[in-house]
Amino acid sequence: MPAAGRPGVNRLVLFDIDGTLVLTGGAGARAMTQAFEQVFGQQAGASPASRLADVPMAGRTDTWIVAEMARICGVESDTESLQRFRDIYISHLAREIHRPGPRKGVLPGVREALEALARRDGTHVALLTGNFVSGARVKLEYFDLWRYFLCGAFAEDAPDRNALFAHALARVEACGGPALQPSEVVIVGDTPLDIGVAVAAGARSVGVATGSYDIDALRNSGADVALEDLGDLAAALDAFGV
């Protein structure tokens, strides 16, 4: 387990979005399906939506999800069609995010944790998410959380989530933050894939059981700490090592 933070030592906390910070009530999945049918539906057949239910989305990057959707439906995708998909997906998401849905909202303790981290010298907050950058912004602006994040790593940076770690560190430095070692980084996420990024990089990991996986699943995937949620601020900050 990487060492906990000490006074005067930099700490970067990288947050996932869906299932970690917020739940969108299914807005992302609906927008994905609508965009896919609009861009690829003619090739895929009359109604590919039923087959898209087999695509695992939790913890995946949007670029991976689109490629897997295309593979399952037997359609060809290229740079132009993927760009068109992203633009159409964002337009659908901007509408769907305003619709009601199950468990929609900011997850317990998230606002308080972000406020507390923002007040701490030497502590930096960024995103490591599988969302397209525009999708991340739509979701977090809707819940008034985008303002906490100066930068991050997104689906456009790499289809493989593990590869996002290096992009996140480089982006933080480019945005005026410090050059950081993996031992100074904490990844907060709700899936084993989030935890896997930290394990592969040598960073600290905090799993939150606010998505599709329970505490045992997060611990078994290698999480240094697993919490039911971020509702206990003192426990959350201790888990982050700050």
Image (cartoon, helix red, strand yellow):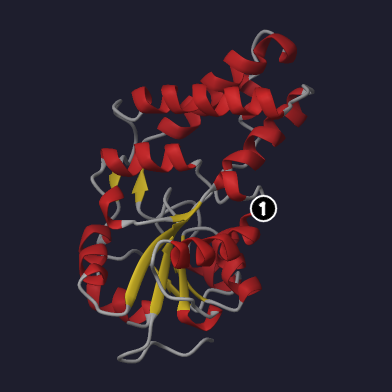
Residue 152 x %, y %: 45, 56
Above or below for 106 versus 65: below
Judge whether 35 appears above or below 155 on screen. above
Q: Quadrant of residue 167?
A: bottom right
x 53%, y 74%: residue: 223
Image quarter of the C terminus: bottom left
Residue drawn where x is 79% and y is 23% of the image: 74
Q: Nearer the viewer, residue 130 or 192?
A: 130
Residue nearest the viewer, comparing 225 with 153? 153
The residue at 66%/23% (across/down) is 81
Q: Position of residue 135 (x, y in %)?
A: 44, 37
Question: SS at mark 1?
Answer: loop
Q: Which residue is mark 1?
A: 160
Residue at 58 percent across and 22 percent down: it is: 84
* Horizontal side, residue 20 vs residue 130: left or right: left
Instruction: Give x and y (percent) for residue 221.
Output: 60, 69
Which of the 4 image quadrants contains residue 194?
Answer: bottom right
Whether residue 24 is visible: no
Give the amino acid at mark 1: Asp
Above or below, 219 relative to 139 = below
User: Camera-side residue: 212 or 48?
Assistant: 48
- Depicted 61 relative to depicted 240: above or below: above
Q: Nearer the viewer, residue 208 or 167?
A: 167
